[in-house]
Amino acid sequence: MGFWESIRKSLGLDGAGDLEIGEELVEQPLHGGVGAAEDYQLGPDDGVRVFPMPITAEADVVVSYSGLLAKAGATQVYLHCGEGPGPWQNVRDVPMEEGPPGTWTARLTAGDGGTLEFCFHDAAGNWDNNNGVNWSVTVHSGRDPH
């Protein structure tokens, strides 16, 4: 079994590259992962988790947030995201759904490669942008580089 094939298998991807997950992915908090794959916390105690990791181009991605805005009691949180590197393309705000108290979750589709860049804001105009550097995760093509 090749390197990428073993990663796809561990993430629950079938041969066509589709995730074999149900709606429970959005409804359950991302603490410890769902199914065979683990979610990935981007920084120590930053309250940001991404599932699945690694991210494949044009795949569904779930971002979970329990950071500063959630701790401050925000009544609505938005995932502000775009595709990079460089100036963001396809910039959008994705309304997040509140799960367990203080945890917000959004589902989106990754771009066709590069990076997924994001930060968060609430309905009152307060932002959490990771101290000015935003969050960024690599989006790979899913092709074996060899």
Image (cartoon, grey):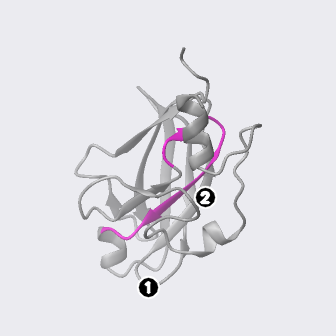
Q: Which residues are magenta?
A: 53-67
Q: Is residue 122 left or right of residue 141?
A: left
Q: Residue furthest bottom?
A: 101
**Residue lying at 77% horizontally and 37% vertically, measured from the top left:** 16
Q: Residues within 10 Å of mark 2 (few under 14, many from 20)?
A: some
| Residue 68 placement (x, y as % from top left) | 29, 69
Quarter of the picture containing the N terminus is top right
Q: Amino acid at mark 2?
A: Arg
Picture layout, residue 7 above or below residue 24: above
Picture layout, residue 130 above or below residue 66: above
In the image, 88 versus 85, the foreground residue is 85
In the image, 120 versus 136, the foreground residue is 136
To which residue does mark 1 refer? 101
Q: Residue furthest top?
A: 146
Q: Amino acid at mark 1?
A: Pro
Q: Is residue 5 left or right of residue 68?
A: right
Picture layout, residue 37 above or below residue 144: below
Q: Residue furthest front?
A: 1
**Residue lying at 57% horizontally and 75% vertically, measured from the top left:** 28
Quarter of the picture containing the C terminus is top right
Of callouts 1 and 2, which one flags the residue occurring earlier in the amino acid sequence? 1
To which residue does mark 2 refer? 107
| Residue 94 placement (x, y as % from top left) | 57, 57
